[in-house]
Amino acid sequence: MNKREWTWFVIRVFGLCLLLDAVKALPRVISSLYYIIHQSFLPSITNHGDKTIDYLQILRSTMGSLFVSSFVELLVFSAMGIYLLRGSTFLFKLICPPDEP
């Protein structure tokens, strides 16, 4: 294999790794979204004092930020992985410029 074929191979493998990272982000997105949707059931346990209310507020903000970061990770990794697997001609031309006679 020459340099150009190895470059295509490395780009495709990197794209596959990014898609696998996107799949790994799916459970975090689903679990944090599930918590955010079902947090309406939590006000019934806030009658136990100020510490419980503070804990729930911290938990809500943590799950919200986890959802946003995981969703952005899912979008970016899947978009870049699909780009690298399907074409990636711009990146390939940057790494291996065409041979000029």
Image (tube, rainbow, N blue to C red):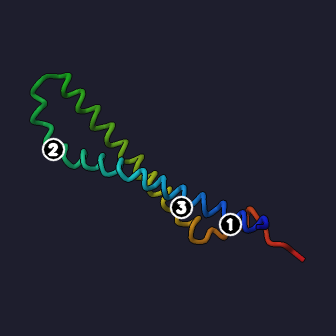
User: Percent position (x, y) of residue 80?
Assistant: 54, 60
Seen in the picture, residue 16 relative to 69 is either above or below; the reply is below
Q: Give the mark nearer the N terminus: 3 vs 2.
A: 2
> Under tag 3, what secondary structure?
helix
Q: Give the mark nearer the N terminus: 2 vs 1.
A: 1
Label annotation for residue 40 = 2
Identify the residue at image location x=49%, y=59%: 19
Q: Mark 1 sits on what residue?
A: 8
Closest to the observer, 99 or 51: 99
- Mark 2 neighbour class, 10 Å CA radius: few under 14, some 14 to 19, many 20 or more: few
Type of the residue with mark 3: Gly
Q: Of all residues shown, which one is farthest toward the front?
A: 1
User: Percent position (x, y) of residue 86?
Assistant: 57, 71
Type of the residue with mark 1: Trp
Identify the residue at image location x=15%, y=44%: 40
> Under tag 1, what secondary structure?
helix
Type of the residue with mark 2: Ser
Q: Mark 3 sits on what residue?
A: 81
Measured in 3D between alpha carbons, the distance from the residue under mark 2 to the one under mark 1, in whole angstroms, is 50 Å
Quadrant in the picture for the N terminus: bottom right
Q: Give the mark nearer the N terminus: 3 vs 1.
A: 1
- Mark 1 neighbour class, 10 Å CA radius: few under 14, some 14 to 19, many 20 or more: many
